[in-house]
Amino acid sequence: MNNLSNTLERDILSVSALNAKARQALTLGLGRVWVEAEISNFIRAASGHWYFSLKDDKAQVRAAMFKHQNGQTTFTPKNGLQVLVRAEVSLYEERGDYQLIVSYMEEAGHGALQRAFEALRLKLSQEGLFAAEHKKSLVPFPHTIGVITSPHGAAIRDILTTLKRRYPLVSVIIYPCLVQGTEAPAHIVHALTLAEQRQECDVLIIGRGGGSLEDLWAFNDEKVVRAVFASSIPIVSGVGHEIDFSLCDFVADLRAPTPTAAAEHCTPDRVELAQRIKKYQKRAQNAVLMVLQMTNKHLIWQQKRLAEPRHLLIQYQQKLDHIQYRLHRALITSLNEKQQKLLLQSQALHSMSPLATLERGYAVVFKDTQVIRSAVQLTLGDRIRVKLAEGEVQCEVTGRI
């Protein structure tokens, strides 16, 4: 009787009920957690779900990430990879296995850096460091190019080779610095400061070869980004490969996908430049030829309008002869008119002359030079001169009547 009573007082659970309660307790008690660990025993099921374990050096836990969640993961999980996951603590009731149901996964180191990258990018963007109005134009034909990078990496060799190939006239100044590691940001800032103080370059190339986000992190350092923004010299950023982005890319005056591309952006291509020069020479020659042709046509037209000098002289000679003939005729006519007028005036004058009176039989008596008009002017014995129409006679007064 006592055994039966004890049995009735007990809360007896089935295994499935126990596991259900355990799952509920784990889910409600711990809820959503972030766990950083190493992947092991990774299995990609035919259904598309992922099953794996997460472990550290002391323990491990089973985990699952279902297809509708893992499709958004940007990398391929594999054994040994350190990851950061967001998950709910649960229990697989059929086996009683404690497990994590993962809803998000990222590479552990990369994820932290990526979040820091995005946070700093947002901060600097809000300050206006990436705004287009701050971008400076590049010089089309630079005299000197500065390169801020490691003097021993592949990037500097690619840059120098490209500059020599495209534009061998340009001078290159290398500002050597570390481009990776904890000391790299200070080195890069020092190189930028030195270039700014010297003011000996028309443009600066800052960059390095490709690598992981951790390798490129020096170019995401806030001090480096602000030093790039403060530069009065135009800066071209060529950090990593085409798929890599750094904050220096956003703040620089121009972003190039690679160091080689950065060198190409900074210089004209001598082959293309030579072709352009030939093109301009051809256009100039055609323009000069066209001007000469138009001038020649105009000259021919003017020559047609302008008669030969010999013909002009003949025309002017004929015109002069005609003028002389007219002048001679006018002179003769004028003389004839004047002679006729003079004759008429002479005749009129002669008709009033004493000579005309003499011609009618009269005479003029002079005593010395005095004209005698009355006999009382004479005395006996005076000698007088009598002027006739033709000739003169001398007389002596012998009496008066």
Image: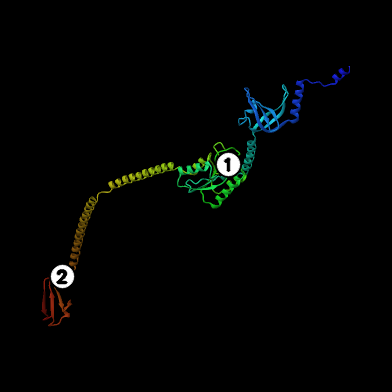
Answer above or below: position of 79 versus 155: above
> At 15% from the left edge and 76% from the top edge, which residue is drawn?
365
Kindly state the secondary structure of the residue where label 1 is placed: helix
x and y percentages locating residue 156 in the rendered image: 52, 43
Q: Which residue is mark 1?
A: 250
Quadrant where the N terminus sits is top right
Instruction: Please indicate whether residue 339 sits to the left or right of residue 99 in the image.
Output: left
Q: Mark 2 belongs to which amino acid?
A: Leu
Q: Which residue is mark 2?
A: 355
Q: Mark 1 belongs to which amino acid?
A: Phe
Which residue sits furthest right? 1
x and y percentages locating residue 337 in the rendered image: 20, 60
x and y percentages locating residue 231 in the rendered image: 57, 48
Quadrant of residue 376 within the rendered picture: bottom left
Number of numbered discs:
2
Kindly state the secondary structure of the residue where label 2 is placed: helix
Answer above or below: position of 14 versus 159: above
Q: Nearer the viewer, residue 268 or 107?
A: 107
Whichever of labels 2 and 1 marks the residue nearer the N terminus, that label is: 1
x and y percentages locating residue 51 in the rendered image: 66, 26
Q: Is residue 313 visible?
A: yes
Alpha carbon distance from label 2 to label 1: 133 Å
Q: Is residue 400 visible?
A: no
> At 11% from the left edge and 78% from the top edge, which residue is drawn?
394
Quadrant where the C terminus sits is bottom left
Comparing marks 2 and 1, which lies closer to the viewer? 1
- Label at residue 292: none
> At 15% from the left edge and 70% from the top edge, which residue is drawn?
355
Q: Nearer the viewer, residue 367 or 137?
A: 137
Quadrant of residue 396 within the rendered picture: bottom left
